[in-house]
Image: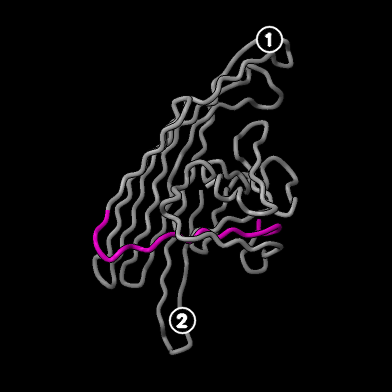
Amino acid sequence: LKDVLLRLPNFFIFDSGTFEASGMMLRGGATQHLNNHVLLLINGRPLRESQNGGLHTDLSLLFPLETISRIEVIRGPGSVLYGSNAYSGTINIITKNAVEKFEGSINSQIGSNGFGKHSATVTSKISDDINIYVNASILSDDGHTLSAFDEQGNSGSQADTKDGQNLFVDIELYGFRINAIQNEITMPTVSGGLRWTNSADFKIERKFYDLSYQTQILSHWTLGFNLTHNQ
């Protein structure tokens, strides 16, 4: 997802001193290394990071591209329509619908330094009222090795390893729709200034669940509701 979004004009994903791909910036609106001025939506529902509001490392590195139908970008303030964080812009990720017949696929990416990303997708339109789309993926990367003297003059080295898993579920059932994302990624981090004594592995976890219902009550009227959980 990171590589796709970086194709947008005037958009930037940046690393902090602690996390990789931690923030997203539109229109030069970054105020800190954890930017909470760009709101991410999945099928119109907000993805909020409860502690800082703008830590997107897991989505930038783990979200499966094969599930995406299109990405909508709205530049400028949008908090009136979309709520908090939509200050510099809003990015809405629209996922694919289930196909008519049962379909399964496997994707694998392999690169240098032990990089590997593998995913499996299963989708089926069982009936007019039941649709299922499920994707599971794993990421592993031995990364580059950083060797340096820290601010205390101590020599050390550390590999930029990454290990992560992501599960995406989209189920439609008699007017109800369930979207769920559950993932985690572990990577090394150094808190504050570069001190090898402060280095440790850090795990980022996300749990997103959205239950919605929509029905047509009149020719020009639709009734619906959403219940969304972010953690």
- The residue singled out by tag 2 in the image is 222
Q: Which residues are magenta?
A: 85-103
- The residue singled out by tag 1 in the image is 154
Percent position of residue 183, x then y: 44, 43
Per the image, label 2 sits on a secondary structure element best described as strand
- Please name whichever residue, 155 or 180, is drawn nearer the observer in this view of the structure: 155
Label 2, residues with CA under 10 Å away: few <14, some 14-19, many ≥20: few
Rendered residue at 44%/36% (across/down): 164
Q: Is residue 201 magenta?
A: no
Type of amino acid under label 1:
Asn
Taking the image as shown, residue 8 lies to the left or right of residue 132, namely right
N-term mark: 1 or 2: 1
Tag on residue 62? none
Rendered residue at 24%/70% (across/down): 127
In this rendering, which labeled residue sits more in front, label 1 or label 2?
Answer: 1
Type of amino acid under label 2:
Thr
